[in-house]
Amino acid sequence: MSDNLQILVDLLPRLGEGVLVTLELTVGGAVLALLVAFVLGLAGRARTRWARVPSRVVVEFFRGTSLVVQIFWLYYVLPLPPFYVELDPLACGIIALGLNYGAYAAEVVRGSINAVPTGQWEAATALDMGPVHRLRRVILPQAWPLMMPLFTNLLIQLVKGSALATYVSLHDLNFFIGELRKGTTETVFAYTVGLLVYFAIAYALTLVMNALEARAKNKVGQGPSLREVLRLTPPRVDTAEVRP
Amino acid sequence: MNDFWNWDHAAAVFPSLIKGLGVTVLATVIGMVIAAILGLLVAVVRRSGVRAVTWPVGFLVEFIRSTPLLVQLVFANLLFTQFPSLAVGCAVLGIHYATYMSEVYRAGIDAVPKGQWEAAVALDLPRGRTWRDVILPQAIRNTLPGLGNYAISMFKETPFLAFIYVVEMYAAAQAYGGGNFRYMEAITLAGLLFLLVSYPTSLLVRRMENRLA
């Protein structure tokens, strides 16, 4: 066992590189997914058919086909004729993750915006707000807290999906687990360490997302503020204070 | 045009893709049966309120849920070399999805009105009968759409089985591509076949959702 630990300590810099690649994929994929989600989600509720139909087709396509097939299509098929587009493996991973989870998240965006009561739309229209202004100041701040828990789930899914990157020649955390296994010849040890690191990453991201969710909820007057949540001393209960 | 898409290659790869699709569907069905049963067990156990049981089960569920399926598959396959990889793959898929399904069941059980529990207590029904004849029939009705959605999502994760040398649809496409240096038709057709199965299923699930809602 101590030999294994020694090998693990020797390999720590490699572990760091692996985690870094996994995080790059996660952050890149998540940013792209968020962008895709808002573009497709907003287009999905547009009034004209010209925006709505393409958005539905793209969402159903990326939700309906496997992430594995998509990532390999980008990696193996795209450099061949007639495309001749050679992507960096990291870009391949980020694009596949971003499009796949972006399609899922587009449904979240669409559903959450639909869940904002119609009265809010009508009130904003009555106040003569333009479409962009209305969306930015009235609708999205209310839809955002509804989206957050679902985005958290998708982000964790995305972290797990990034393990595929090993097979498009990226040296991510999954690849490191294989290296550790070869180094120690201990399958159980290597995979236990690897899975624990994945768990730690996923758990840390969950905590961050929960904090963002608390902040989003507080901004529309639900629940305590982030500062109150993070404070170590329990909040003082003031019975006289009544929230309007 | 010839460079782009060659129908001869498409026709040549098609039979092995259909054979692979069979394995893919088989793995999905077996995995889903395991997930549905195990998930229900986990959900009921987690409601028992005995901390010595709920705590370890809760940790295990959280752990399996937030680590990659791919890594779990490769790990299990290296660990249980005495079993065929298809069996290991189905079991891992089933266990991984059981952790998601347990959350679906939990939501379904929570949605059963409190009055139903109280009525069962008032009628002096034993615990087993309360679960079997009162709570679960109502809870499971709410969980059917969730079950359908996870079945589709599991269907699309079966290509992971290719990494533990199970020849399902994706592995068949990859093998053809590698053998003939023509990935275009094989992988594109595999993607289209996925869509062909999963899209009608998702329409079916949506209809079921509307019917039950």
Image (cartoon, coloured by chain):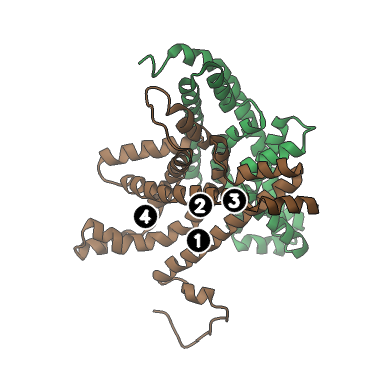
Chain colours: A brown, B green
Q: Are marks 1 and 2 in contact (CB under 8 Å)?
A: yes
Disc 3: which residue: B104
Element at label 2: helix
Where residue A129 appears, as percent x and y from the top left, is 21, 62
Q: Are marks 3 and 2 in contact (CB under 8 Å)?
A: no
Q: Nearer the viewer, mark 4 or mark 2?
A: 2
Q: Is residue B121 above or below residue B7?
A: below
Q: Residue at x 43, y 62 (%)?
A: A145
Kind of residue at disc 2: Leu
Element at label 3: helix
Residue A236 in sight in this render: yes
Distance of label 4 from label 3 (alpha carbons): 23 Å
Disc 1: which residue: A209
Q: How many marks?
A: 4
Distance of label 4 from label 2 (alpha carbons): 20 Å
Kind of residue at disc 4: Ile
Identify the disc placed on residue A115. none
Q: What is the quadrant of the N terminus of chain B in the image?
A: top left
- Residues A148 and A83: in front is A83
Q: Are marks 4 and 3 in contact (CB under 8 Å)?
A: no
Distance of label 1 from label 3 (alpha carbons): 21 Å
Where residue B208 appears, as percent x and y from the top left, is 50, 40
Q: Residue at x 50, y 32 (%)?
A: A72
Chain letter of disc 4? A
B195 on left or right of B59: left
Q: Residue furthest bottom?
A: A240
Identify the disc placed on residue A155. 2
Where residue B204 appears, as percent x and y from the top left, is 49, 36
Kind of residue at disc 1: Met
